[in-house]
Image (spheres, coloured by chain):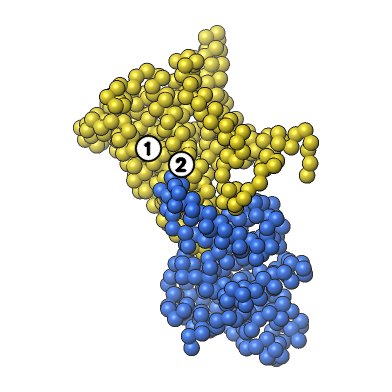
Chain colours: A blue, B yellow
Amino acid sequence: MSNIVLSAKNLRLTFGAITAVDDISLHVKKGQISAVIGPNGAGKSSLLNCLSGFYKPSSGMVEFEGEDITNLAPFRRAERGMARTFQGNQTYQSMTVRENILSGFHNQMSSGLLGGLLYWGRVQKENAHFINLAEEIIEFLELEQLRNTIVGELGYGLRKRIDLGRALGLNPKILIMDEPMAGMNTEEKGDLARFILDIRDARNIPVILVEHDMEVVMDISDEVTVIDWGKVISSGAPDAVRNDPKVISAYLGGDVA
Amino acid sequence: MLPSGVIFKKYSGEEAYLVTRPQKLVFALFIVALFLFPMVSSTYLLGTVSFMFITMIAVLGLQITVGMAGQINLGQSAFVGVGAYVTAAMAVNYELPFYVAIPIGGLAAGLTSILFGLPAARIKGFYLALTTVAAQVMFPLAISRLPRSWFGGPNGMSMPSMELFGYEIWGQQGIYLINLCFLIVFATLTFNLQRSRTGRAFIAIRENDVVAPVMGINLVKYKILAFFAGAVFAGISGGLYAYYVTYVTAEQFTLWLSVIYLGMLLIGGMTSPLGAIFGVIIITLLQETTHDIGGFLSDRISFLDESVIFPATNIVLGAVIIAVLIFEPNGMVRRWRIAKAAYRIWPKPHG
Ligand SMILES: Nc1ncnc2c1ncn2[C@@H]1O[C@H](COP(=O)(O)OP(=O)(O)OP(=O)(O)O)[C@@H](O)[C@H]1O
Ligand SMILES: [Mg+2]
């Protein structure tokens, strides 16, 4: 039982007349990549936003490491080890690559306002220590050449990678990713898929992945949940889901089969 | 861009502002020159520069609140006023020395700002601007209503002179040196803050306040901290101002002054402490020139008296600020960086 890291129980989220999330339950196990797929507007981002605390579900519960976190503010969830990347481009544009990643270490660092102003020995040491940790992530994501580049000057695919690096800075116990590959070319997608697998295997971080590229999803995930109109219509191992008639019809018999 | 031939042995080395020995040497010489400046300067010029130092501290504070953390503040001069008044009260009523009275003034301004920074947790942009304007409106009202024995009521307060180790600091020279010391300290603090954990959190909030909390940043706490830190600087500036002008009244701390502070920051460049320093220099030069030209004109053309000249100089000032915002929205700091990079690759441009 205790190998479940994050679970959503009967989540429901409504916007006026729209029920974006309709009674969804989801369990993410240690060491697994769980994918959430579904057509546009199915409610995938809304589900993730309930998990990370942007939206308060109308009913249902979010449990993280066995504790109820449904009413916890986003920054409290981050403190507990929940990290996420975003749909679209949400990096800190004017910071360098390294500063972006360093900002992910916020909760592990301890110096406050006074320490920052005085920048005395202990604070300098702390900064230097975390710069080295940030460099490990930079190396992992193969961003060495760009460490001092302003992120706003980089292309979309690289910014998504930096978004991921920043999330890894939280030293997370779970990583939530919303459409990390949208807008990437095949090569960039391949790189990112490799990073996600490494995150699961080498860093032991379970991943929840929302992604439209079906081929990638089927290749790298351990579990797939398909939602449509806010409801789970199928879930299980990639192969089982792939052949589920309900899924095929939701995608108009299209690219899944 | 770095000078060529600079190699870092540690990643943390890249954080330093001054890297090469010539850089450090030039900077040290510059500081020494600032300390020697009173020996060659006229009293008028010294007074102007000294006043610039005081203003720089207030604008550096604004750089923290507005530039780093992205929280608009149109009440900075009210916080300068709180600092000036509390410093005056400490110096007059409790006969505390300036190096105790001024920090207390800074702290008082910081605490006051929390009251007006709290709404920043919920609102932003235009509405936040209005809230900070409220600080500006309430300040003179509060001062005139509070017991006369505290802050002198509507009459204001007269300052004693500064004393250090039993010696009276007198004349423009002494005041200049004190102001210079304070500026060096507070400029250093601002540059430090920028690359610290707290500074990064501020910048993260400015850049994306939706993402920042998901990265573990407590928005409410850091927005309030940004107001607090910026207002402490304002309060320090106010304390120095009180000793500089020797007399404080509520009318000295106007909304117009807050707008000028913001203009200085915008012209210099919001995103760097250097911008605050550049901005104060540029606007002061501009004010002095337009003032001189105005005086020149009003001496010669009979219908141009003070009632025309003062608004006219302000219009010129406003026009310059707007022009800079249109043509160089990143402020003069960007021009400075471009010039530096050009110098470093000269005479062989590459890349
Ligand atoms: N803040 C909001 N206010 C009102 N309706 C919303 C809001 N956010 C989402 N919705 C609605 O909820 C439904 C689900 O949206 P959601 O963004 O979760 O879909 P999605 O599966 O992430 O789609 P996509 O693949 O396009 O990202 C949609 O009908 C959308 O219009
Ligand atoms: Mg979405």
Q: Is residue B29 above or below residue B120?
A: above
Mark 2 residue crowding within 10 angstroms, few (<14) / some (14–19) / many (20+): some
The residue carrying mark 2 is B189
Q: Residue at x 59, y 85 (%)?
A: A232
Q: Nearer the viewer, residue A41 or B285?
A: B285
Q: Quadrant of the C terminus of chain B?
A: top right
Q: Residue at x 51, y 79 (%)?
A: A6
At label 1, which amino acid type do we have?
A: Gly
Q: Separation of disc 2 and disc 1 at Cα?
A: 15 Å
Q: Nearer the viewer, residue A40 or B225?
A: B225
At label 2, which amino acid type do we have?
A: Leu
Left or right, residue B15 beside residue B220? right
Left or right, residue A239 beside residue B316? right
Residue A106 seen:
yes
> Are both tags, 2 and 1, on one chain?
yes
* Residue A56 in picture, x, y percent from top left: 47, 72
Q: Secondary structure at mark 2?
A: helix
- Please report whichever mark, 2 or 1, sits nearer to the chain's N-terminal start: 2
Q: Tag on residue B235?
A: 1
Chain bearing tag 1 is: B
Q: Residue at x 48, y 88 (%)?
A: A1
- Whether disc 2's CB lies below 8 Å from ligand 1 is answered no
Q: Secondary structure at mark 1?
A: helix
* Residue B311 in picture, x, y percent from top left: 51, 24
